[in-house]
Image (spheres, rainbow, N blue to C red):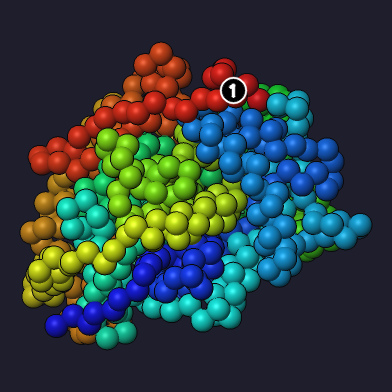
Amino acid sequence: MAILHTHDIVIVGSGLAGLRAALETTGPADVALISKVYPTRSHSGAAQGGIAAALGNEEPDSWEWHCFDTVKGSDYLADQDAAEVLAQDAIRAVYELENMGVPFNRTQHGTIAQRAFGGHTREHGKAAVKRACHAADRTGRVILDTLYSQVIRKGINVYPEFLLLDIMRNKQQVVGLVTYDLATGELHIFHTKAVMLATGGAGKVFKTTSNCFANTGDGMYLAYRAGVPLQDMEFVQFHPTGIAGLGVLITEAARGEGGVLRNQEGQRFMEKYAPTIKDLAPRDVVSRAIMTEVRAGRGINGRDYVHLDLTHLGAEKLAEKLSDISSFARIYLGLDPVEQPIPVQPTCHYIMGGIPTNVNGQVLDIHQQVVPGLYAAGECSCVSVHGANRLGCNSLLDLVVYGRRSGKQILQDLKNLTLSPLPQLPEETAKTNITKLKERTTGVKAGTIRSKLQYCMMEHCSVFRTKDHLESALAIVQDLKDHYEAECCLDYQGAQFNYALVEALELQSLLGLSETILVSALTRTESRGAHFREDYPERDDTHWLKHTLIQAADPQPQLSYKPVTITRFKPKPRVY
Ligand SMILES: Cc1cc2nc3c(=O)[nH]c(=O)nc-3n(C[C@H](O)[C@H](O)[C@H](O)COP(=O)(O)OP(=O)(O)OC[C@H]3O[C@@H](n4cnc5c(N)ncnc54)[C@H](O)[C@@H]3O)c2cc1C
């Protein structure tokens, strides 16, 4: 028998989006926070470079320039009403974090220090501007720890190491969740009036990624399986500077502080691709530039990476502003960035798509109607402020701005939401799923299938894409899904901390999401932001200035489209 809990609101995910929403709703409502990892191990804690806000502490800046950069960076796919909210509310949000106790770096006048970042410009692209508020290169760590201590202070119910397995609906309304307690192996049912998904990204779909092991996109996949569409899944960001061969991130702040990319000839090649802002062009532009250099044989020693040169910044600046990434270079590569350049190549970093919401975090169905009782914010959601390509430092901002807004909306809706009955035998699907995996004693381990999937997605669906590649990837993924169904088995059957089981369950999310990415990418016959089709290299506003929606259906997922909201900025060619 599963154990039953009842709360007004259940928030899944304790990264910044979930924590911020929990802080907003506790007090007036009884809130529970569920996380499959210990809360402070959420990927938000790995964020390095900063959080964007036009404070203008270092040089003149305005929220309207920030909004423009976000829209242009998105290759005009962002919904501009959502981008306006983001940029406008950024200033309040950063001061709020400061008041909660976040130890930001300071200017010599004692105000919050800011630095340059990719795609952040003044006066609509004239030159780079310092907009990224930061705490050295561990900004996410300090914000996560600060918000989590506030959560503890307020006595919010936290269920750590609980894995979400199923979202339950009663007709349209979301009424509860089925979860699995990693410590005991027991199933727990949460009966609730409102569920908020803040389950983060899905970088683990790809072989090379900056993301942590937990980023398997469960929230997106389980929402999709529960009948919610996913939006813009073809837009997957590759960050240009992952450590070659490993994918571990070297923050864009390294270039914000003056670092430059060089090819085999020592040439600062970004001057060719983005003459105005060079190494600080948005990530999609820089990632393609690196791959183009590599393809032309100008990778280092003819290999598939280039150099990030920080040697001219000096030991003092590296120690003060970029200490974490300097130690990554020492630990992972055995090199000192004060003396030697760092080998880098694009690494999967961020999923622009996700669960569609309005600007108040309410999840929208295929007909643009609010799904009662379901909310989403953070990387698992798609508002959409990032469109086809997210700018650096806009994610942390998105989390606290839209986490808070979702919280406010839930409190407002709670007046009309009731505890609707749970389905009979709510845990049945989850139980059957687990039993099937545990009972099979011979077959293929989840890790083997996952490696094949990650290799396939990297090979066929990363920085450059074509019809042929995407079609072969789809066939491989279908094959892997069948393989999983027929053969996936565990090498440990125990109840306590059964990570073999967790990984097998997470693999269902990775397989399901890979299909949504491939089907959406195959259909979009244009190039926009992070989605670059070599067979359709131009952006095509006439046919494709629209959001993709993909919905689960048998035998094939169904695609539909919805218009982009344009308020201030008419789409123009993107030149940097
Ligand atoms: C290395 C790195 C550096 C980055 N640097 C920056 C930066 O400097 N600035 C910036 O703006 N952005 C940065 N980003 C992006 C940003 O950090 C992420 O997009 C953001 O932290 C996601 O936050 P989130 O709250 O949506 O989810 P996360 O922080 O990823 O947390 C997800 C939560 O969901 C929970 N969860 C997931 N699935 C389940 C499940 N099945 N059951 C229960 N719980 C579940 C997890 O336990 C976790 O608590 C960086 C990303 C990476 C990977």
Residue 521 at x, y percent in the picture: 32, 32
Picture quarter with the N terminus: bottom left
**Residue in front for this viewpoint, 521 or 35:** 35
Residue drawn at point x = 57 percent, y = 52 percent: 401
Asked if residue 378 shows in the view, the reply is yes
| Residue 150 rendering spot, x and y as whole percentages | 59, 74
- Residue 560 lies, with reference to residue 90, above or below; the image says above
Outermost residue on the right side: it is 109
Q: Which residue is identified by label 1?
A: 569
User: How many numbered circles are shown?
Assistant: 1
Q: Residue at x 57, y 31 (%)?
A: 71
Q: Is 288 displayed left or right of 253 in the figure?
A: left
Residue type beneath disc 1: Phe
Residue at the outermost front position: 415
Position of residue 226 in the picture relative to residue 111 (left or right): left
Question: Which residue extends farthest top?
Answer: 542
